[in-house]
Structure formats: structure tokens, C-alpha cells
Amino acid sequence: MKRREAREKALQALFQIDMSDIPPEEALMNVQKEGQSDDFLRDLIVGATSNLKEIDQEISSHLEKWSIDRLGKVDLNVLRIGTYELKFTEVPPNVAINEAIEVAKTYGDEKSGQFVNGILSKIKGEGM
């Protein structure tokens, strides 16, 4: 599985977790094809959910005149994946941000890419 596809599937899994309150392992099984396994996908889902409190605090600290509760679920979960990649993985920061922007453009609304870029760029700038 290519990493872009893994990120898209991770978005689908995190969305399921948000909407249905299912365990990460179940969400992972729901988005994988039978017999398929991908370590990067597993890492994105399990890593983002395991560090959710810290990730959400990081995102919240960069929202201006917004609360995390007001964000659309697609944008929020793209930000969670991007923040996880920036803070907890060895993925180059610019790659993580560019990939998040592309996923946001595909699954979000017309302003999602720009919004995700702004937040993740602030997160990158503060701690990298």
C-alpha cells in the first residue's frame, strides 16, 4: 500500500472511531482489505489514537477564534494524522504537511487544504 493510500485509510478509520466510538483495532480491520496488512497504516491509526490527548491539545493551541469541537470531523482527523506525523514519526515535516493538504483537498471542502496547511505549518514552526 502506498503511503497516500495509508493516510486516506487512516482518515477513514479515525472518522469511524470518532463517529462510532469503536476501538482502533476494529477501525483498522474495517479499512483494510481482507488479508492485507500495512505497518504504516497501523502506526498512523494506533499512534494517533494513543496520543490523542496531546495531539488535540497541540491542534487546539493553534486554533484562532475556534475550538476543536467546532472543526469538521474530516479536517480534525486530517490534522490529527498530520500532527502525529510531525510530532511522533521520522516523516520529513514538509512531506507530512503536503500529504495532509492533499488528503484534506480530496476529502474536505474547498477551504480544507488551506486550513490544514495553516495549522500544521504553525505546529511545525514551533517545535521542529
Image (spheres, rainbow, N blue to C red):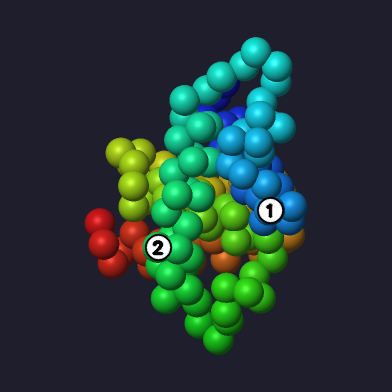
Residue 15 visible somewhere in the drawing = no
Amino acid type, label 1 = Asp
Q: Is residue 49 above or below residue 32?
A: below
Residue tagged 2: 54
Question: Residue at point 53% right, 32% down?
Answer: 41
User: Which residue carries the number 1 mark?
Assistant: 21
Which amino acid type corresponds to the residue marked 2 in the rendered image?
Glu
- The residue carrying pointer 2 sits among few (fewer than 14), some (14 to 19) or many (20 or more) residues within 10 Å by Cα, namely some
Question: Furthest residue to the top?
Answer: 35
Quadrant of the image containing the C terminus: bottom left
User: Picture quarter containing residue 75?
Assistant: bottom right
Residue at 68% x, 43% y is 12
Mark 1 Cα-neighbour bin, 10 Å: few <14, some 14–19, many ≥20? few
Quarter of the figure that contains the N terminus: top right
**Which element carries disc 1, helix, strand or loop?**
loop
Which residue shows up at 41% across the image and 67% down it?
Answer: 58
Where's residue 110, x and y in %? 72, 60
Question: Residue 89 lies in what quarter of the image?
Answer: top left
